[in-house]
């Protein structure tokens, strides 16, 4: 596929890739956790979340691929077969539009739950806004995803609280995870021209509203967890939304995309 | 099988006359196909054997997640990733309700898991083989889950109620997995490239014999079988089940257009059964004793998951205690 970062594409495509790639990359982090949960019950719960995320990725990327195919046809270019799998398994890192937060490595259970909580608290409020999207397909996928994300947030909040207000060790680990991950939260709340275009098109909610709600959720949970909230004014590491990633994404994709890339002639699996 | 070589603590069967009155009543209940429930009296050896068998079965489900987890991150399409993840999740679920059914016998999950981690408890030998290519995800579903179903379908009628009921649900999910696994292989054989077809054959070559070994030693080397059959916690002999599996599997192998790594495999017109070559029992006993390709790795993976999670479980307990204290 043509390197998408090189070419200007409609903001809707970019925006949907952000949604799909967040789910896909975080889902893949869950796949890496298989067999490593601290208890059997958590094994089931982690897989549940992973399944939801891969399902969401398939829905968003499926829609992107339809839009891309239509566009290619309109410009009379010969289209490769573009489907959700093509987008997931044949794109390079710079074409991924996910948040830096979701590509961060698994680390220990505090890192895993911290990452999940910071994402879920944002995801729920964003999806809630997207259920009112002027595009009915987006509203529909958002409504289904919102139900799942609401459960994810409940679970990750509970774990942040348990670990924060558990033992001394768990508190230390949870605080450390939060401090390390905090730098990746800036781009959740900071809008760019694509967010603005989507707001104007009646698709996305105002990111400022999402930010306000995210902060309220985070503050409430961290307080109950007896954790110290890092400063909103701290330096933030951004770039995922425009394809400038951390070093971790390349390895995640190398593993995930191995088979389709090693056997490019295979059309079915 | 998922529970191979389960010790019963006895090599000789008692007659009804040799039994105490309560043991006799127990055996008659079994003979009449009435389920034994957790609160019913049962001989100590029956209880211990069942704990061993169910825990082995549960451990197999949990260890069995690992060879599949090895390919979960590399599943080649979103559909296959979702299917495989759901399958692995089902296995964790099977493990959970098998442990629960074992706990109705007074056993403790954590203690039994400790036995797995220090090598005292067994799990199915099949999971000590490595998964080396993507087709292994199909072969495991087709052959390994297929063999599990042949063993577990009769266990739906096993004499211990909670185990029998757990098996009903497990069997439904396993047959779904088996069809899915076969479909992975069929897709690659019918529509795949030469490389993909070669993957399938290579995978079958590696898993064929280990799958046949899943049913345990041949009947003449199965000293515990008679007692397990009398208690109806086993309903058919190892060799009977192995034959049943082979008879249903060979036509499926032919439909794939693949071969078995067994030059002696042939159909016997007179008996209506497939005949097969000699199983390498030395390999089987080696793997059961811990000397298979992945034994150490699998146990180490399980042990480190639980050990690394100790602080998480402690935190959950500490937090629950704080909550309770605050509520009081």
Image: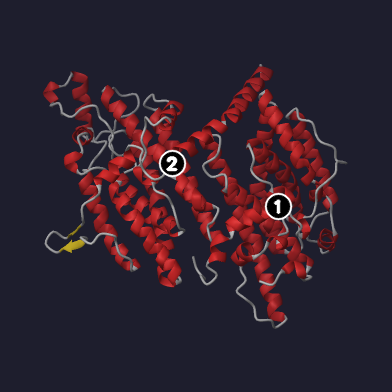
* Mark 2 belongs to chain: B
Q: Residue at x 26, y 23 (%)?
A: B43
Percent of width and height locating residue B278? 21, 52
Answer above or below: position of A128 versus B301. Answer: below
Which quarter of the image is occupied by the C terminus of chain B? top right
Tell me if label 1 and label 2 are in contact, CB under 8 Å: no
Answer above or below: position of B45 versus B128. Answer: above
Say which element carries label 2: helix
Residue A205 visible within the image: yes
Percent of width and height locating residue A73? 68, 80
Answer above or below: position of A71 versus B1. Answer: below
Disc 2 designates what residue? B63
Say which element carries label 1: loop
Q: What number is the disc on residue A247? A: 1
Label 2: how many Cα within 10 Å (few below 14, some 14–19, many 20+):
many
In front here: A57 or A172?
A172
Where residue A199 sits, quadrant-wise, is: bottom right
Q: What number is the disc on residue B187? A: none
């Amino acid at each position: 596929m043509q390197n998408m970062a090189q070419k200007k594409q409609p903001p809707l495509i970019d925006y949907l890739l952000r949604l799909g790639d967040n789910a896909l990359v975080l889902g893949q982090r869950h796949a890496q956790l298989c067999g490593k949960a601290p208890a059997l019950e958590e094994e089931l719960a982690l897989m549940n979340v992973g399944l939801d995320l891969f399902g969401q990725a398939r829905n968003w990327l499926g829609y992107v691929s339809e839009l891309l195919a239509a566009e290619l046809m309109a410009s009379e270019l010969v289209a490769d077969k573009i489907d959700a799998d093509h987008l997931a398994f044949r794109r390079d890192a710079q074409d991924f539009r996910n948040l830096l937060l979701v590509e961060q490595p698994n680390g220990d259970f505090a890192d895993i739950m911290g990452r999940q909580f910071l994402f879920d608290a944002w995801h729920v409020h964003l999806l809630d806004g997207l259920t009112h999207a002027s595009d009915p397909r987006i509203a529909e996928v958002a409504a289904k995803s919102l139900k799942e994300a609401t459960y994810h947030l409940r679970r990750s909040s509970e774990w942040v609280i348990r670990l924060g207000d558990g033992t001394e060790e768990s508190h230390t680990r949870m605080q450390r995870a939060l401090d390390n991950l905090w730098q990746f939260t800036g781009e959740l709340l900071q809008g760019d021209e694509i967010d603005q275009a989507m707001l104007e098109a009646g698709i996305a909610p105002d990111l400022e509203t999402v930010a306000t709600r995210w902060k309220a959720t985070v503050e409430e949970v961290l307080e109950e967890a007896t954790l110290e909230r890092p400063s909103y004014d701290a330096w933030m590491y951004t770039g995922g939304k425009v394809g400038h990633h951390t070093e971790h994404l390349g390895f995640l994709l190398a593993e995930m995309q191995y088979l389709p890339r090693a056997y490019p002639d295979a059309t079915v699996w | 099988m998922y529970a191979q070589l389960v010790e019963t603590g006895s090599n000789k069967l008692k007659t009804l006359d040799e039994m105490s009155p309560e043991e006799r009543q127990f055996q008659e209940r079994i003979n009449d196909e009435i389920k034994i429930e957790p609160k019913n009296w049962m001989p100590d050896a029956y209880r211990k054997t069942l704990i061993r068998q169910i825990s082995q079965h549960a451990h197999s489900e949990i260890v069995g997640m690992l060879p599949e987890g090895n390919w979960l991150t590399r599943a080649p399409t979103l559909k296959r990733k979702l299917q495989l993840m759901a399958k692995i999740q089902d296995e964790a679920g099977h493990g959970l309700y098998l442990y629960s059914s074992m706990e109705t016998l007074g056993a403790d999950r954590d203690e039994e898991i400790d036995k797995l981690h220090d090598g005292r408890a067994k799990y199915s030998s099949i999971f000590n083989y490595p998964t080396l290519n993507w087709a292994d995800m199909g072969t495991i579903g087709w052959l390994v889950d297929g063999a599990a179903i042949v063993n577990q379908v009769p266990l739906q009628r096993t004499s211990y109620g909670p185990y029998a009921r757990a098996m009903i649900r497990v069997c439904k999910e396993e047959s779904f997995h088996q069809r899915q696994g076969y479909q992975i292989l069929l897709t690659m054989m019918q529509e795949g490239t030469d490389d993909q077809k070669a993957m399938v054959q290579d995978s079958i070559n590696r898993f064929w014999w280990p799958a046949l070994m899943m049913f345990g030693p041949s009947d003449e080397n199965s000293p515990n079988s008679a007692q397990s059959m009398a208690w109806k916690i086993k309903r058919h002999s190892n060799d009977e089940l192995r034959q049943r599996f082979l008879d249903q599997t060979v036509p499926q192998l032919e439909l794939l257009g693949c071969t078995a790594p067994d030059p002696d495999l042939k159909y016997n017109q007179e008996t209506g059964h497939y005949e097969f070559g000699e199983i390498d029992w030395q390999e089987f006993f080696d793997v059961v004793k811990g000397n298979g390709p992945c034994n150490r790795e699998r146990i180490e993976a399980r042990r480190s998951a639980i050990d690394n999670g100790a602080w998480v479980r402690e935190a959950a307990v500490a937090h629950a205690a704080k909550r309770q204290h605050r509520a009081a």
